[in-house]
Amino acid sequence: MPKKFLKRLTKADIGLVITLVLLTIGSSVSFLKKNTNNFDYAECRIDGKLVKKIDLHKNCEVNLNNGMILEVNDNRIRVIKSDCKKQICIKQGWIKTTNDIIVCVPNRTIIYLKNSKNKNSDLDYISK
């Protein structure tokens, strides 16, 4: 049966199959590629209030004075110490892409990345 099927294929059928395969591979690569913009700073909010803007271009440690210490390295940020019980914010690891965010519920803290060129945007978050 496969030989009969292959004999019935025309050049247009083969071209269509190749085009569909290439489109599928191309869309998969673009979908899996994360948006890794080089962000300018991270915003840290406690109880919804902005408490710190941290420059991501300077490698350092930042104490939020609420039991949390952050580390900045290579345009990314993470929590390295927290006094919360489950340590979920530490397990989150580095954030460096558009959709990454660190939330520590016991310390009422949210950390996310921002660009200075987007500082006038009315959007807080976009949910997928």
Image (cartoon, rainbow, N blue to C red):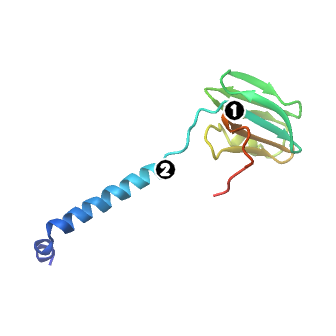
The residue indicated by pointer 2 is 32
Question: Dot 2: what SS?
Answer: helix
- Residue 57, by quadrant, is top right
Q: Identify which residue, 112 or 125, lies in the foreground.
A: 125
Q: Indicate left or right for 86 with 16 as reference.
A: right
Q: Identify which residue, 109 or 43, lies in the foreground.
A: 43
Marks 1 and 2 sit apart, C-alpha to C-alpha, by: 26 Å
Badge 1 or badge 2: first in the primary sequence: 2
Seen in the picture, residue 27 relative to 59 is either above or below; the reply is below
Q: Quadrant of the C terminus?
A: bottom right
The residue indicated by pointer 1 is 116
Residue 21's x, y, as percent?
31, 59
Amino acid type, callout 2: Leu
Q: How many marks?
A: 2
Residue 52's x, y, as percent?
82, 31
Q: Quadrant of the N terminus?
A: bottom left
Residue 58's x, y, as percent?
68, 21
* Residue at x 62% of width, y 43% of height: 98
Q: Indicate left or right for 107 with 119 as reference.
A: right
